[in-house]
Image (tube, rainbow, N blue to C red):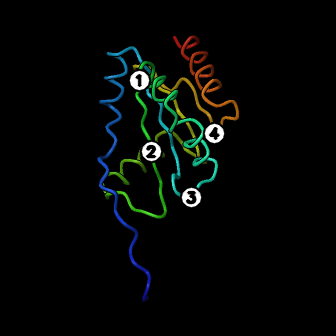
Amino acid sequence: MEGCAPAPVHDQAPIDLNAAVIRAKADHKLVLLDFTGSDWCPPCMRLHKEIFSKPEFEAYAATNLIFLTVDFPRKFQLTPDARSTNDVLAAKFNIEGYPTLVALDGEGKEIWRQLGSLDGGLKELAADIASAKAKAP
């Protein structure tokens, strides 16, 4: 078909969850996985615009999180390795919708999950994560 150019490929390295968990444990942080459709999912785009793109989140994440974006774009393609890794992570964590946030402790154990947007912004996210971390064994 004329006019149907293939979607551009973004050369993004596959996520190394094991390395992230090891780093989180060493740094006394949590791993936060953001399962998103960055270029087609309105709640995902809102979450990024209102929380993840803000300097306040970057400062919070720098001291508390290993933040990983597990993207499922439609307007561009990931490399085959990155796409395969993201598919494996989505299956591992039983992702049923976007956005889904999953927090893991330093052992790689899920301690918190949020499906959908966070109306309370960074304050709600930080409070939810702190509460989950306090309850984790």
Neighbourhood count class around disc 4 (C-alpha, 10 Å): few under 14, some 14–19, many 20 upward: some
Neighbourhood count class around disc 3 (C-alpha, 10 Å): few under 14, some 14–19, many 20 upward: few
Q: Under tag 1, what secondary structure?
A: helix
The residue singled out by tag 1 in the image is 62
| Residue at x 37%, y 21% (from the top left corner) | 24
Q: Nearer the viewer, mark 4 or mark 3?
A: 3
From this view, report whether residue 92 is shown above or below residue 6.
Answer: above
Q: How much space separates mark 2 and mark 3, taking CA atoms? A: 14 Å
Q: Amino acid at mark 2?
A: Val
Q: How much space separates mark 3 and mark 1, taking CA atoms? A: 27 Å
Q: How much space separates mark 2 and mark 1, taking CA atoms? A: 18 Å
Q: Which mark is residue 25?
A: none
Which residue is the extreme one toward the right? 119
Q: How much space separates mark 4 and mark 3, taking CA atoms? A: 16 Å
Residue 90 x %, y %: 48, 45
From this view, report whether residue 132 is shown above or below residue 36.
Answer: above
Q: Earlier in the sequence, mark 4 or mark 1?
A: 1
From this view, report whether residue 70 is shown above or below residue 76.
Answer: above
Q: Which mark is residue 70?
A: 2
Q: Nearer the viewer, mark 2 or mark 1?
A: 1
Residue 112 x %, y %: 57, 26
Q: Earlier in the sequence, mark 4 or mark 3?
A: 3
Q: Under tag 4, what secondary structure?
A: strand
Tell me, yes or no, whether the two marked residues, 4 and 2, touch with CB atoms within 8 Å.
Answer: no
Q: Under tag 3, what secondary structure?
A: loop
Residue 110 x %, y %: 51, 27
Residue 106 location, quadrant: top left
The residue singled out by tag 4 in the image is 115
Q: Amino acid at mark 3?
A: Trp
Residue 11 x %, y %: 29, 55
